Image (cartoon, helix red, strand yellow):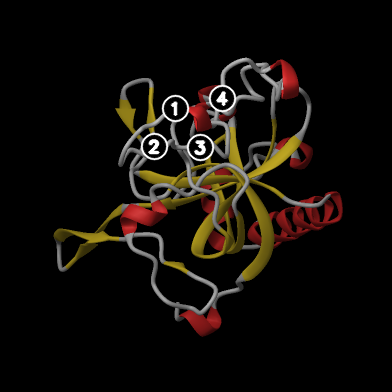
Amino acid sequence: MSVDERKLSCVRATVRYQSLTKTEVWENQDTNRFSVLVDITDEKLQKLKVECMEAWMAYQETDDYKAKVKNRKIKNDAINMPVKEDSEGNEYVKMTMTHIIEYTKGGKTNTFEKNVPVYDGHCKNVPKKIVAKIGKGSIINLTYELAPYFNNVKNYGVLGRIVGIQIIKYVEYTGEPSPEKLGFEDLGDQAGFDIADVDMGDDQAEGQDMAAPSAEEVPPPEDGDF
């Protein structure tokens, strides 16, 4: 299927967590997937849910679905979707891309490598070392496609596949929590110690502008049919 024939969608989103240069590892196993977790508006969340259900209903009319499901009963209200829920009950979106794809041609197994294309605001390619540091709070345009699948009666639904990303606002991941995350605040006149009073020579103090994403925010991978 050519790009022109694919049904692609694009949404403005705020990054929660990303693994766009290294594939996710879950329980010490490489999932072979890149991923990004994002927040979108409630209106867009509801629209995405509707799009997922429409894609699923269309998939039920295909020969692939009928061959896999046969006469088994499937609950349409229990399908997996890219919309997830965190421990506090807040909904967010998870999109993925398979890194290494295996396919058979002429009786021989071949592999094809995919990486997430990432662009800046002028549509120029962003180097991997910059992509790797896209932090929580970054704003992106996320282009994706929906992919219905059926593996078994307990694992079926619609996956959100990453097609490409454009960075609108870049917040660098520092790997360290912000003072606010640690419960600190500006003490004003009661501060006592001020780093500006210390002569550091050529050294520069490095500020922290974001909190590191929590590992608890990363849900387990789905076994979708890629």
Q: Which residue is drawn at 75% across and 59% down?
A: 51
- Name the foreground residue: 32 vs 190: 190
Identify the secondary structure beneath mark 4: loop
Under mark 3, the amino acid is Gly
| Residue 123 tag number | none
Q: Earlier in the sequence, mark 3 or mark 2?
A: 2
Q: Earlier in the sequence, mark 2 or mark 4?
A: 2
- Write down the quadrant of residue 103 in the picture: bottom left
| Residue 207 tag number | 3
Identify the secondary structure beneath mark 2: loop
Frontmost of labels 2 and 4 is 4
Under mark 4, the amino acid is Asp
- Name the foreground residue: 198 vs 184: 198
Residue position marked by numbered label 2 in the rendering = 24
Q: Earlier in the sequence, mark 3 or mark 1?
A: 1
Q: Which residue is drawn at 70% across and 41% down?
A: 92
Q: In this view, does 132 lie above or below 89?
A: below
Indicate the position of residue 4 as horizontal and vertical percent values: 52, 84
Q: Earlier in the sequence, mark 4 or mark 3?
A: 4
Identify the secondary structure beneath mark 1: loop
Q: How far apart, in angstroms, are the residues tagged by discs 4 and 1?
A: 8 Å
Indicate the position of residue 34 as horizontal and vertical percent values: 41, 47
Under mark 2, the amino acid is Glu
